[in-house]
Image: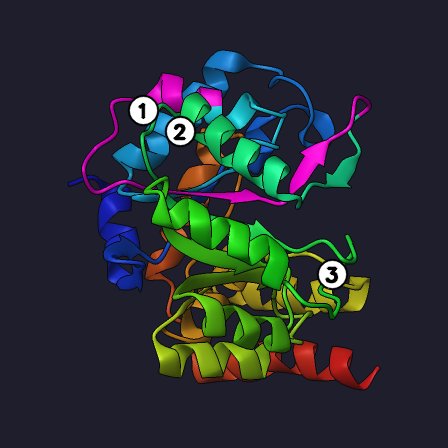
C-alpha cells in the first residue's frame, strides 16, 4: 500500500451503483489539450498521471468521449488497460464537440447511442460501469425541462447490457426526481463547492436515498474575497487551498465523491493527500461563511 493509498483510504468509501469506491477519485478532463480539445501537450506525462492515480489507490475515474474528443478515453485505455477489477470508470454523454471545439447538444436517440458505442470502443470495454446523462438546456448550469426522452434512450441502452448504471449531470432537483421515477439513479454530478451551494438540500436528500453526489469545479466561481478567506484557512493548516476545498467537501456529506482533475503528478499527489485533512470546527465555520455570503449577495 502506498502513502497516497493510505491517505485516500482515510476518507472512506461510497457506493457507486453496485460497487464501492474510494471517496477521492480522478477526473480525466484536464488530460486533453487546451479547452479540453485536441491532444495533450505531453502524451507521456498524461499517461504517467493516470498510472500514478491508480498506483495511489484511486479506483474511480471520471471521463467522457467528448473530452478531446476521444482523447481522454484513449489515454485511459493506453495507460491502464486491461483494467484492475476494482476500477470503476464513469463516463458521460449528451454533448459533442464542434470542429472548432464548441460544446453542442447531442441528445437524440441516435446521438446518445453513438456516444455509448464511442465510449465503449475507445475505453476498450464491453459494458460501461456508469454513464451520466449530461443535461444541456443551459450550458452554464442546470435549467428546468423534462429529461424523459433522452433518459428513455439511456434506459434502453442499459436494458441492452451496454450500460450498468445511470447517473445524471447538470440537473435540477425536479429533474432528479423525474429521473428516479424512470430508473435507478446511481449518482448526480453537478457544480458544487464552498462558494456555489445551490445543491445543499439536494445533497442531503440524495444522502438519505443512498445516492452518490459528485461535485465538479471544486474551486469554480470564487470571488477574490472568497479565495482570500480560503487561502487564509489553508495557510493556518499548512495546506493548499485546493486541499482545504476538497477536505471541506469530504466533511460536508458522506455521500460526496470527489473527482479532482490535474495533468501533473505533483498536483495529483497533493489532491490525494486531502483525504487525511480533518478540518477543525473554527475552519469549517469560517469556510461555511463563504457559501452564506455568496447566497446573500
Q: Residue at x 42, y 76 (%)?
A: 253
Q: Residue at x 48, y 18 (%)?
A: 45
Q: Which residue is mark 2?
A: 50
Q: Is residue 241 visible?
A: no
In the rendered structure, the answer to whether residue 177 lies left or right of residue 211 reads: right
The number of discs equals: 3
Mark 3: secondary structure? loop
The residue beneath circle 1 is: 80
Q: Position of residue 27 (x, y in %)?
A: 49, 42
Residue 131 sits above or below residue 117 on the image: below
User: Going from the N terminus, do you reach mark 2 or mark 1 first?
Assistant: 2
| Mark-to-mark CA distance, 3 and 2 | 28 Å
Callout 2–callout 1 Cβ contact below 8 Å: yes
Q: Tell me which segment is drawn in magenta.
A: 74-100
Judging depth in this view, the residue of 115 and 287 nearest the camera is: 115
Callout in the foreground (2, 1): 1
Frontmost residue, 4 versus 216: 216
Name the element at disc 2: helix
Q: Nearer the viewer, mark 3 or mark 2?
A: 3
Write the residue at 55% across / 28% down.
Answer: 31
In this rendering, the label closer to the viewer, 3 or 1: 3
Q: Position of residue 158 (x, y in %)?
A: 38, 49
* Quarter where residue 250 is shown: bottom left
Query: Is disc 1 placed on a helix, strand or loop?
Result: helix
Could you say which disc has been placed on residue 141 in the image? 3
Quadrant in which the N terminus is drawn: top left
Amino acid at each position: 500500500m502506498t502513502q497516497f493509498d493510505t491517505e485516500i483510504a482515510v476518507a472512506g468509501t461510497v457506493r457507486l451503483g453496485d460497487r464501492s469506491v474510494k471517496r477521492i477519485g480522478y477526473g480525466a478532463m484536464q488530460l486533453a489539450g487546451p479547452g479540453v480539445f485536441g491532444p495533450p501537450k505531453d502524451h507521456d506525462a498524461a499517461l504517467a498521471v493516470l498510472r500514478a492515480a491508480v498506483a495511489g489507490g484511486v479506483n474511480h475515474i471520471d471521463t467522457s468521449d467528448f473530452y478531446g474528443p476521444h482523447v481522454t478515453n484513449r489515454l485511459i485505455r493506453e495507460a491502464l488497460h486491461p483494467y484492475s477489477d476494482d476500477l470503476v470508470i464513469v463516463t458521460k454523454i449528451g454533448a459533442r464537440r464542434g470542429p472548432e471545439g464548441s460544446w453542442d447538444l447531442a441528445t437524440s436517440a441516435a446521438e446518445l447511442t453513438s456516444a455509448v458505442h464511442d465510449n465503449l470502443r475507445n475505453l476498450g470495454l464491453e459494458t460501461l460501469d456508469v454513464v451520466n446523462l449530461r443535461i444541456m438546456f443551459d450550458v452554464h448550469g442546470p435549467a428546468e425541462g423534462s429529461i424523459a426522452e433522452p433518459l428513455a434512450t439511456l434506459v434502453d441502452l442499459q436494458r441492452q447490457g451496454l450500460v450498468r448504471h445511470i447517473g445524471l449531470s447538470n440537473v435540477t432537483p425536479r429533474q432528479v426526481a423525474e429521473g428516479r421515477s424512470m430508473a435507478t439513479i446511481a449518482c448526480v454530478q453537478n457544480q458544487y463547492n464552498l462558494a456555489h451551494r445551490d445543491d445543499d438540500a439536494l445533497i442531503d436528500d440524495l444522502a438519505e436515498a443512498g445516492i452518490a453526489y459528485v461535485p465538479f469545479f471544486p474551486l469554480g466561481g470564487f470571488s477574490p474575497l472568497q479565495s482570500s478567506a480560503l487561502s487564509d484557512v489553508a495557510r493556518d493548516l499548512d495546506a493548499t487551498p485546493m486541499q482545504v476545498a476538497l477536505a471541506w467537501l469530504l466533511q460536508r456529506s458522506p455521500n460526496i465523491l470527489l473527482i479532482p482533475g490535474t495533468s501533473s503528478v505533483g498536483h495529483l499527489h497533493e489532491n490525494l493527500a486531502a483525504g487525511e485533512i480533518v478540518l477543525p470546527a473554527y475552519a469549517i465555520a469560517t469556510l461555511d461563511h463563504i457559501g452564506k455570503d455568496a447566497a446573500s449577495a
